[in-house]
Image (cartoon, rainbow, N blue to C red):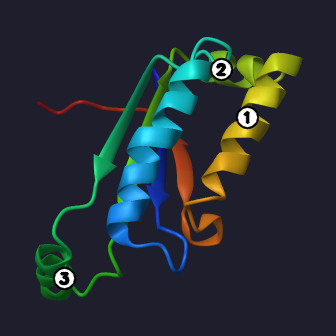
Amino acid sequence: MIKLNFCLHRRAGLSREAFLDYWFNKHAPLVARHRNVLRIRRYVQTHGHDPAIDSTLRESRGGPAPFDGVAQLWWDDLEALTGAVATPEGVRASAELLEDEGKFIDLARSPLFLGDEREIF
């Protein structure tokens, strides 16, 4: 399995509550609609917790500002991912998702990366 981790910062001017609501109630169904074309096996949203708690954790470690959430998507392998986005349907689905992400995510501040999950326990 290959996993995409997308560490999200919300767009400026968007409240945390509005960001989380849009992400869960509008964007998630869009991802679900395209799951077969894009060959996505699993999609999980981790919504940021209480900002006060996050600040305490961050300050105790000297870390950067916390993310508003993390999206995680799984594919069977890299070939499934690259093959899905190489089809005309996959290109259209990817473009639609990216356009929607621009409505609520500060894309320039939201890193994403692919990796292999290694379960420890």
Q: Residues within 10 Å of mark 2 (few under 14, many from 20)?
A: many
Q: Identify the secondary structure beneath mark 2.
A: loop
Residue matched to label 3: 55
Q: Do residues under tags 2 and 1 come within 8 Å of each other at their CB atoms?
A: yes
- Sequence-first disc among 3 and 1: 3
On the question of residue 4 being in view, the answer is: no
In which quadrant of the rendered view does residue 83 lie?
Answer: top right
Give the distance between the C-alpha atoms of the residues marked 2 and 1, in whole angstroms.
Answer: 8 Å
**Identity of the residue drawn at 65% across and 20% down:** 38
Type of residue at label 2? Leu
Give the distance between the C-alpha atoms of the residues marked 3 and 2, in whole angstroms.
Answer: 36 Å
Above or below 37: residue 65: below
In which quadrant of the rendered view does residue 62 lie?
Answer: bottom left
Between 25 and 28, the one nearer to me in the picture: 25
Residue matched to label 2: 38
Type of residue at label 3? Ser
Q: Position of residue 7 (x, y in %)?
A: 45, 57
Above or below 34: residue 46: below
Type of residue at label 1? Ser
